[in-house]
Amino acid sequence: MTVERGAPIFLAREHDLHTMRVLAAAALFIASIAAHGAPIGYDGARHLLNRVGFGATDAEVRDYASLERTQAVERLLGGARREALLRPPAFVDAPFEPYYRIRQMSPEERMAAQRRLVEQGLELRAWWLREMLVTPSPLTERMTLFWHNHFATSQQKVRLGQLMYRQNALLRREALGNFGTMLHAIAKDPAMLVYLDNAGSRKQAPNENFAREVMELFTLGEGHYGESDVKEAARAFTGWSLDRGTGEFTYRRVWHDYGEKTVLGKSGRFDGDDVLDVLLARPEAARFIAGKLWREFVSPNPDPREVARWATIFREAHYEVKPLLRAILTSDAFWSAENRGALIKSPVELVVGTLRTCGISPFDLRPAVFATAALGQNPFSPPNVKGWPGGDAWITSSTLLGRKQWLERVFRGSDPATMAMTEHGDDAKAAAPGERYRRMLERGMSDYAFDVERFDRAIASAPGPARIDRLLLATDAVNALPDGLDSAERVRALVADPAYQLR
């Protein structure tokens, strides 16, 4: 294209700028196509597998290194599971113990029942961490944990381990399935009904807790609904309750408000399912989920334009999760060098990831459970309905010290007397259970020791300092490592480096 003779000079310059922009965009597009078509390499495979799982092994990284970006993502999505690999604890199939029977117990019986529930909770957590360690699809467990934090419920209020397990199975079943299906199911999930007090909601006194949180935390986000929407939606969820004898969902017709409601500008004789459909029809819902997944997989600061693009894909796929994840994991934003090492490992990622990457397979995972709880992330017990805030909140003065001490205990065999892990929080004196955690931790830590010979054998195909560094760190080490370190010394130095806290 040419500029006509005699055209004003600013038009010619504008044409030149336009041409430059087109050429630059074309260059970026070509570079993106080339990146998609080239093998992701060792560093790319490590980045992908550690973002979507819990500590990749050297063998796993090498297995993915020769794949192109799309091939690698398709393999991950194709390997997703809907059920856990391991059998759950036996108590989940035991006869259901209704809440009212516990209330009818003597004080001594209630104390025994409480101890039993605590033990069941511990057993359930150890089972889930074990699943994270051995699953052939770490992405499935990563997404199950993501949805657990999104639809946060806590055993501290729900109490019954059976209900918490049922919810965990539901989240895994739809972890990479359909968000709409999961939303409808979670609204009727017994653990959620107990946690957000909807089990007793009736037309004479609608409880607003679930109606508020389903808008603010589960679908739309703050600022996209009003108080009248909450009140009207609460009426729609009346009658959604529990069977006292089985702990299963039941619909109590006489408790339901059959009158007309208006939610987000839509009116009708809505029940809860109708309200959920109204929420899913809003474009804010897809953007809200896409934004959360950016923060989960890419960086703390979402790009609004890219999130909007992902949200469109999500809506057009009728809330199927896999197309959304495919868009995220093949995006240039995910693979950008500036976003590598941009996220802080959660306690579960740190503990489980360390065990997986370094080939540590302890017989007893209760110490790992105590460690994650002490560092601020206790699965099945998020702090509140908002879940764990994540990001910089994972690191405080006490949790940073606790992370360092746990890693020392695994890799250096520190004297148990020096282990002073505390519960999550800044006030060590207030964390009295921290001492109990420490004692429990030490009792089962004997088989957590790092076996450097086994580790060396695992990377025998290409041993050496560079390989160890690339496997363990998402970025360059912050502190320079001395020359002449053997494998064991190098691993200890690397896990002690601040860069090891990043993914």
Image (spheres, helix red, strand yellow):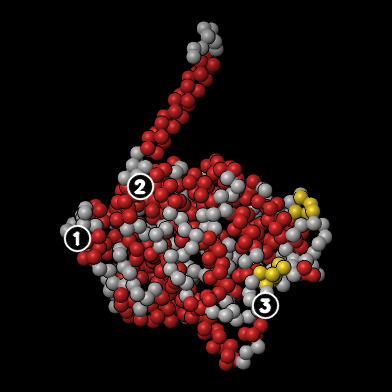
Query: Residue at 39% of width from left, 81% of height from top?
Result: 439
Report the mark closest to the observer, 1 or 2. Answer: 2
Residue located beneath label 1 in the image? 485
On the image, which quarter does residue 210 sit in?
bottom right
Q: Amino acid at mark 3?
A: Arg
Identify the element where label 2 is drawn: helix
Residue furthest out toward the top: 5
Q: Are marks 3 and 2 in contact (CB under 8 Å)?
A: no
Residue at x-position 37% and y-position 37%: 37
**Marks 3, 1: nearer the viewer:** 3
Q: In this orientation, which residue lies closer to the viewer: 13 or 286?
A: 286
Q: Nearer the viewer, mark 3 or mark 2?
A: 3
Q: CA distance from mark 3 to mark 1?
A: 63 Å
* Mark 2 lies on residue: 44
Residue that carries the numbered disc 3 in the rendered image: 244
Specify whether 267 is left or right of 132. Answer: right
Where is residue 201 shown, x and y percent of the image?
73, 69
Local SS, label 1: loop
The percent position of residue 412, horizontal first and vertical second, equals 27, 71
User: Could you tell me residue 503's position as x and y percent?
Assistant: 39, 55
Whole-percent x, y for residue 260 in the image: 82, 57
